[in-house]
Image (tube, rainbow, N blue to C red):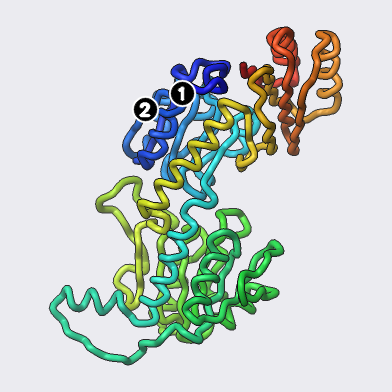
Amino acid sequence: MSRRRSQATFPAGQIKVVLFEGIHNSAKTFFERTEFTVVEVSGALPEDELIKHLADAHIVGIRSKTQITAKVLESAPLLLCVGCFCIGTNQVDLVKANSLGIPVFNAPFSNTRSVAELIIAEIVMLARGLGDRVKELHEHNWNKSAAGCHEVRGKTVGVVGYGHIGSQVGVLAEAFGMRVLFYDIAKRLPMGNNKSVDSLNTLLSQSDFVTFHVPATPETRDMIQAEHLATMQAGSYLLNASRGSVINLEALADAVSSGHIAGAAIDVYPKEPRSNGGGFESPLVGLPNIVLTPHIGGSTEEAQESIGEEVAASCTGFVSQGNTSTAVNFPHIEQQWRPDLHRVLNVHQNVPGVMAEILSILADHNANIHAQQLGTDDTIGYLVTDLDRSVSDDVKAAIAALPTSIRTRILY
């Protein structure tokens, strides 16, 4: 055991991690190397059962189906952080977690390539009608024809949301000889010869393929309705591997049935089954040139292994050192570890006068501050202070007693 881990506030073996939904074994391996205790639970659980499993948990790891509600968070008194072993975090009440001093971590990078490769594969599938040809042969029906089939070289793909995945789609599409346009509400650096457009409608009207890579926000809910589909070129294609709330699937089904949209590839849905098996429903089922996949954009062995390590490392870094530089709902702090000192971590209400009180406590205890960082957002402040060992326990107790303190820990 390294000196750093042996001197954490809690002995490493007393840190309990509960992992749900078949998270890749790389996460368990990472946590166990840190000597944390890992419990695995298959599938997603209803709220009441979830609360029982988290009664003594310090870290919870989930994927997209487990719902970490305000009630769950309030019922987990030992919970230090939440790890979302995926990109999305809308399954967690981020505001409540923030108010309780619980950072939430995700994996914004690890499945980028897997999702981008799926999109490129589906662009080719749609351009050649491969989904229908495969289905026909399985039904013993030979249908060899070039009608309606095209190369993707020279065609235009429009990328809505030019973040990690969207920009990678643009890079791969250019390698296929495609022209790439993108639209994002934030200013983004174009990759290669990718070009930014000034509006969503401009992108829709100029693209042969439109692919969506946006988060679930109020602005992206029902982002694409019938009027947007009408703006798209006749005979164009739509792909969505972002969030199920982005596309109005009834409107898309109508546009495909009318022939205005030549095909679509959908990986995410407004309502998804909680477990494998039956129960999937969609207005797109049975329509021609529709590729439907069960939310598998990031479901490759390589991506899941990388996600397991990435999120486990973020959670471990917070528990053992207090680092929050990759948290999605928390002020970002990353302070170099000093094993010869003690570290006091304090989450407090972001109101006037808090720092004056904390600095007064430090002065009263004649504490020598070796390093200190403060990060704030609209509701909380997060203070990391490295002190001499001789006064750290008393300082921690005094800071924790402040009425504005939400959570205070000490790391040895």
278 to the left or right of 164: left
Label 2: few (<14), some or many (≥20) within 10 Å? some
Kind of element beneath mark 1: loop
User: Which of the pair 100/156 is nearer the observer?
Assistant: 156
Q: Quadrant of residue 94?
A: top right
Sequence-earlier tag: 1 or 2: 2
Q: 177 and 76: which one is in front?
A: 177
Residue at numbered disc 2:
39
Tell whether 206 sits left or right of 33.
right
Q: Position of residue 14 (x, y in %)?
A: 46, 17
Q: How far apart, in angstroms, are the residues tagged by discs 1 and 2?
A: 9 Å
Residue drawn at point x = 35 percent, y = 82 percent:
128
Disc 2 secondary structure class: strand
Residue 405 visible? The answer is yes
Q: Is 227 situated left or right of 256 in this image?
A: right
Q: Amino acid at mark 1?
A: Ala
The answer to whether residue 46 of the structure is visible from this angle is no
Report if the CB atoms under discs 1 and 2 are less than 8 Å apart.
yes
**Above or below — where is 339 with respect to 377?**
above
- Closer-to-camera residue (20/339): 339
Circle 1 is placed at which residue position? 57
Q: Nearer the viewer, residue 339 or 126?
A: 339
Picture coordinates of residue 378, whole percent (x, y): 75, 38
Image quadrant occupied by the C terminus: top right
Horizontal and vertical percent position of residue 193: 62, 77
Please give the label number shown on residue 240: none
- Give left or right: position of 166 versus 377: left
